[in-house]
Image: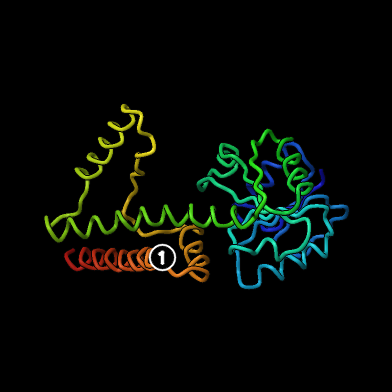
Amino acid sequence: MKSLVIGAGQIGKALQEIFLKAHICFLRDVDDLHCEDVEVLHIAYPYSVDFVDITRAYINQYKPKLTIIHSSVAVGATDKCGAHVVHSPERGRYPHLAAQMQKFQKFIGGGDAVDRLRAKSYFDALGWETVLVDDSRQTELCKLLSNIHLGLEIAWRQEVDRISESLLGMPAGAVYSAWEKSYNDGHTVLGHRQLLRPIVRPAPIGGHCILPCTDILSKQFDSDLFRFIKGSNAKRKTEEESTADCAVSHR
């Protein structure tokens, strides 16, 4: 199928790399691109307050048979973009997105049954396993919650260091990491995979996913957890800056 990806960031470039294996696929960023007879339009730019209006304008310009939104968006945004629009968010880690994305099932939410089947056919040609979901609000929320969950794990680990500093005079460090690894090893042997925990570093949260997703959902649902993530991360940045300043002053 002839397709066009709008958004030439890391997600958009990775998508084009994958799609070219089985489809004709062009890539556009902000600058205009003349492209006729687009069958599938892919949206891969970040969410903003103008996201729906911008997306509707692209749909009106290219008039595709199907539009697939890959971005992390507010719950309900996909339905507002018009007919024949589905939501299919990405998973994977930078900088190897193109190699990792297809390791995850491709959830396709929203549109009507024909739209979802058309999207499925597009991904089937790539050997990409799909899961069809009637309501795009579910895929939108799942993507937001998934990224926020990782942010919560990191914020927890940041707080663990603060607790350890207060009670022991040192960060939790290697012993805590070894304890958590031993916990996971034991439950793996016991077959309790549902109890396994991620072991993350307490570094400040970076990237373009966790904090933006937290901000998006916090505008739709008020939660102390969201404030904890953002507050802990801001505090962690200040702590690292203070540590760096102390190191400089002792040279």
Q: How is the image coloured?
A: rainbow
Query: How many numbered markers are drawn?
Result: 1
- Residue at position x 24%, y 55% in the image: 160
Closest to the observer: 173 or 131? 131
Quadrant of the frame with the C terminus: bottom left
Residue 181 is drawn in which quadrant? top left
Most foreground residue, 233 or 134: 134
The extreme left residue here reads 168
- Helix, strand or loop under label 1: helix
In percent of width and height, residue 208 lies at 51, 59
Q: Quadrant of residue 174?
A: top left
- Does residue 90 lie above or below 33 as drawn? above
Q: Is residue 119 left or right of residue 193?
A: right
Disc 1: which residue: 226
| Residue 215: x %, y % from top left | 49, 67
In this rendering, the answer to whether 116 lies above or below 78 is above
Camera-side residue of 27 and 246? 27
Please report the residue visible at 33 percent of the width from the left and 50 percent of the height from the top: 201
Give residue 64's position: percent from left, percent from top.
82, 55
Q: Residues within 10 Å of mark 1 (few under 14, many from 20)?
A: many
Q: Is residue 135 above or below residue 197?
A: below
Q: Farthest residue in the right direction?
A: 37
Give the quadrant of residue 225: bottom left
Q: Quadrant of the N terminus?
A: top right
Amino acid bearing label 1: Phe
- Residue 153 x, y percent position in the rendering: 36, 53
Instruction: State the residue at coordinates (25%, 43%).
Output: 177
Left or right: 201, with 107 as reference point: left
